[in-house]
Image (cartoon, grey):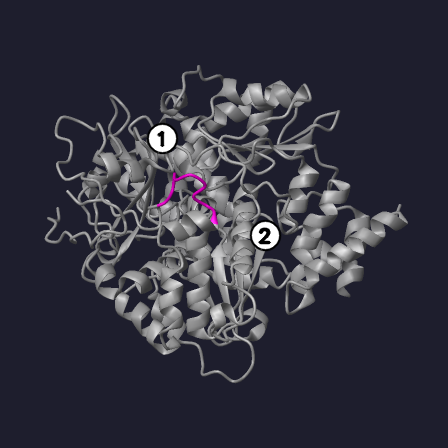
Amino acid sequence: MTDLTPVLSATWGLERSWNYDTYCANGGYEGAKKAFAMAPADIIQAVKDSGLRGRGGAGFPTGMKWGFLPAPDGGPRYLVVNADESEPGTCKDIPTMMNAPHTLVEGVIITSFAIGSNHAFIYVRGEVVHVYRRVMKAVQEAYDNGWLGKNIQGTGFDLDVTVHAGAGAYICGEETALLDSLEGRRGQPRLKPPFPAVAGLYARPTVVNNVESIASVPAIIAKGVEWFTSMGTERSKGMGFFSLSGHVKRPGQYEAPLGITLRELLEMAGGMREGHELKFWTPGGSSTPIFTDAHLDTPLDYESVGAAGSMLGTRALQIFDETTCVVRAVTRWTEFYKHESCGKCTPCREGTYWLALILRRIEAGTGTPADIQQLLDTCDSILGRAFCALGDGATSCITSSVKLFAQEYADHVEQGGCPFDHSASALFDYEELPRTAAEEAHA
Amino acid sequence: MTYDDATSATLVNEAAAIMARYPVKRSGLLPMLHLVQSVDGFVSPDGIQFCADQLDLTTAEVSAVATFYTQYKRRPNGEYQVGVCTNTLCAIMGGDEIWRRLSEHVGIGHDETNEDGTITLERLECNAGCDYAPVVMVNWEFFDNMTPERALAIVNQILEGKDVKPTRGADTVATFKDTSRVLAGFPDGRADEDQGAGVATLAGVEFAKNGAPVSKEAPKKAAPRAAAKAAPAAKTGRGKK
């Protein structure tokens, strides 16, 4: 049995855990103190050596990303924190910022010092006002205590942090769309290259990192690379949040070494809800191909999940039991991608539109056998042909579910409707009524 | 209709404060749209003109941005934005039924506002509270583990003019306008208000501390483990299927 390793979550639940004093009383800002005594290049090297990989889904090595910045040319360079947590199933950065925003602020200070940035931005999604309050307050406290502003702690290093609220757009979690949004534009992804490291915010060298990645930096610096690399697997080092949601007894945030399995996590979470069994789950959010009970023992690290045909993503484990209609689940995710497609590129804009139409009619029982093949063909026309990863992500749940649950799709077509009682999946009792005219219209 | 002199003067000052946060002033557009929403209750034609004037943009350029983001409303919004998450996980855990009951009860559909302007209903996409599904958001505060009855009770409180209390968040839900003002980056001094971290948020922390009453074969090594302690040994050699 793997043990949990609360690091970022260690102080959650303490009295006023979000406050500067609580944070400092529990080892806060020790990493920053240590970092200021190091050469910036050594901090970057330490993060490289730690093997920390991006916790926002893509898993790109964080230190390597920092290392891509060109040599200083006297002009500004920026750190931008992606706090636009919106991937369906993902719910780890929100509690981090709500309960321990100083882990993020301290990470921002260390990272900015390492990469030579004097202005950092934290782009928080707009739909979480209390989180925004807490992050703004933490930044203010950092200014008040001499951790931000001019000549920080007498080091001569200056840093300003701007906390910025988005306004509701999933696509802004894509790093270049986020940069456009932060520049006051529609959040649409940019053509890469140039990558943000070369031409990012205001076309200046920019590092964009996820909240959890940046919040992991203080502990790496304070406790050392060896401490961090002692956790995890050979190529997936350290700890991370595993966010369990759905039909489990105790959903929630479980901070554990990478490589833990769903079987272990399920045991910690009390198992599936009483009298039910696992049917399918997402290892890393809705953009990652679904898994079944055949993957209970797959180590949840980048390599093993990849080898098993999915992606570790954001470690957002959405767990569904046998009452759940997979066609219903996939249809709803597809409606999400259709809604959130920014419209910039044709494969994604048109593709998600047609996928949603076809899935809706299959779910409603008016699909044809040819529709299922049409879904796969349409996915083929999107995957690898869209401007950014949103389009690719939209196909994941469709292709994986058609493969794993082909009969369920066929049943909808043959039986002329959904064979499942939707009320059986709900966490409260109710009797399912026929859909109203308004609901039909929406569907 | 344009802003009166006093409103206009305040807005100009606040817009200047927003622009000062960024090296390039156009970056202030998103917060500025939240700001005009805090005055008008939506992104009004006046608001668009105001942003355009402050940022030396055309109204078309401002509208292009405003229409891209779902939080900017093009019609006067209700005092309380009540959103039901109907993305897959919440929908299946009961969000669809909660939505049906709320919509029926208030008598309006998605993105519609009731007659007295107290409530706007919205079918939400994932709001990052999945471990508390099904989730309802009121003015972007969390209402966790909802049932139709609980959600209806919240809506009734709003309809009766009473304050509502989120599950995780401030002591009471601020109005749509006041919330928009916070999102424009003007703190309302309520960051320390707290309803507790939440059971799901602490599930792993509690398990690490106490172990948990899982089953007879509960893990033996669920010993307390403070983060500050020595490195936990990495487990290797895990069997693959």
**Magenta: main secondary structure:** loop
Q: Point out the stretch of residues depicted in magenta.
A: A11-19
- Provide the secondary structure element on which disc 2 rests: strand
Using residue A91 as the reference point, say whether residue A242 is left or right of it.
Answer: left
Residue shown at 70%/39% (left/top)?
A: B177
Residue shown at 47%/75% (left/top)?
A: A116
> Which of the two residues, A380 or B13, is positioned nearer the viewer here?
B13
The residue pinned by badge 1 equals: A325
Q: CA distance from mark 1 to mark 2?
A: 36 Å
**Residue A408 percent across, percent down from the top left:** 32, 33
Label pair 1/2, CB-CB below 8 angstroms: no
Mark 1: which amino acid? Cys
Chain on which label 1 sits: A
Residue shown at 57%/43% (left/top)?
A: A129
> Which of the two residues, A291 or A143, is positioned nearer the viewer here?
A143
| Same-chain status of marks 1 and 2 | yes
**Residue A16 percent across, percent down from the top left:** 45, 41
Asked whether A128 falls inside the magenta stretch, the response is no
Residue A345 in view (yes/no): no
Residue B159 lies, with reference to residue A402, above or below; the image says above
Asked whether A18 falls inside the magenta stretch, the response is yes
Among the two numbered marks 1 and 2 on one chain, the one whose residue lies closer to the N terminus = 2
Q: How many marks?
A: 2
Chain on which label 2 sits: A
Image quarter (top left, top right, bottom left or bottom right) of the N terminus of chain B: top right
The mark lying in front, picked from 1 and 2, is 2
Would you call the spot at circle 2 few (<14 residues within 10 Å), some (14-19), or many (20 or more)?
Answer: many
Residue B23 lies, with reference to residue A103, above or below; the image says below
The residue pinned by badge 2 equals: A165
**Residue A163 percent across, percent down from the top left:** 57, 56
Would you call the spot at circle 1 few (<14 residues within 10 Å), some (14-19), or many (20 or more)?
Answer: many
> Which of the two residues, A157 or A120, is positioned nearer the viewer here?
A157
